[in-house]
Image (cartoon, rainbow, N blue to C red):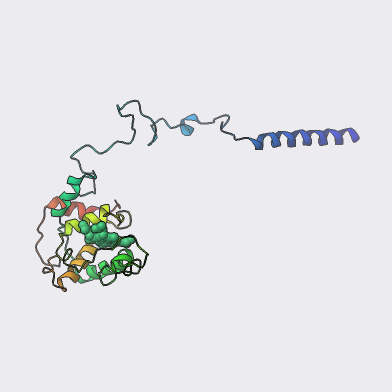
Amino acid sequence: MNRTKSIVVASLLVGLGLTACNSGGMRRNPGKVYAPDMTYSRAYDAYTYNPNFEDSLTSRKPVAGTVAMGHELPDHLKEGDTLAYKSYNTALRFSESDLKEGKRIFDIYCGICHGQKLDGNGPLYNDGNGKFAAAPANLLGPNYLNMPVGQMYAAIKYGKNKMGSYASQLDIKQRWMIIAYIKKVQSENNGAAFTMGTGTPATTDTSAKAADTTAVAKH
Ligand code: HEC
């Protein structure tokens, strides 16, 4: 009996000792791998070295001149592409309830800086009381009153200087609803007449329309 006891105690001590040794250092080796195909990716991981390309980058840019499905224009962030947005428009039309929704999401995402009155004086800025580093655009001011909708779109999609991109928060239709809302308010404050309302004929290419209306993903 005594002997069994001491064997049990001894093996417990050995076990404890082994565990103690193990828990100290960093264990980088996973040991035996049951299903190597699942543990080790056969495909190149996004940020790993890739010997198949001269520049060794695994993540490739889209082929020049192509537009990803559901996107409207190429995603290359070159100056030329950003300028191309100036003439970009949407064939979507916006009803009263769209404009109401546009106001709702403007107040959530943009009003904090641009102000619910669109005067560039939202609570995050408030006449520059040291809160936000840059003055948000006064969307009712002369520089912005007649800004092309495509340029506004570019600001939302890519951001503009200190203003960040809102591409991941707002899908394509939401971006346009916000722009329509801004344009509507601008038209009531000496801006050009509002032409994005129901019933106005579409003025742009149909590819833009197709991309706009079918897009469900956020990008
Ligand atoms: C964190 C503050 C902030 C938020 C939030 C913000 N903006 Fe801005 N926005 C700015 C600033 C600052 C500028 C001025 C950028 C410049 O010209 O240097 C600006 C500029 C703009 C412009 C002018 C772009 C141009 O080409 O001159 C538009 C249009 C605009 N914002 C729309 C929006 C919309 C729509 C939203 C909501 C989706 C939004 N902003 C959210 C800070 C903000």
Q: Nearer the viewer, residue 111 or 7?
A: 111
> Which one is nearer the viewer's eye here, 165 or 206?
165
Can residue 73 be seen?
Answer: no
Task: Give the residue drawn at x 32%, y 54%.
Answer: 168
Instruction: Please determine whether, in this image, residue 16 is positioned above or below residue 81.
Output: above
- Residue 49: in sight, yes or no? yes
The image shows residue 155 at horizontal and vertical percentages of 24, 56
- Residue 201 image offset from top left, x and y in percent: 9, 62
Question: Residue 66, located in which quarter of the rendered image?
Answer: top left
Position of 149 relative to 12 (above/below): below
At x 21%, y 63%, the residue is 179
**Where is residue 171 shown, x and y percent of the image?**
28, 56
Toward the viewer: 99 or 179? 179
Residue 91 figure quarter? bottom left
Residue 53 sits above or below residue 184 on the image: above
Side of 150 where 161 appears, left or right: right
Ligand 1 quadrant? Answer: bottom left
Q: What is the residue that sits farthest to the right in this orientation?
A: 2
Q: Is residue 49 left or right of residue 88?
A: right
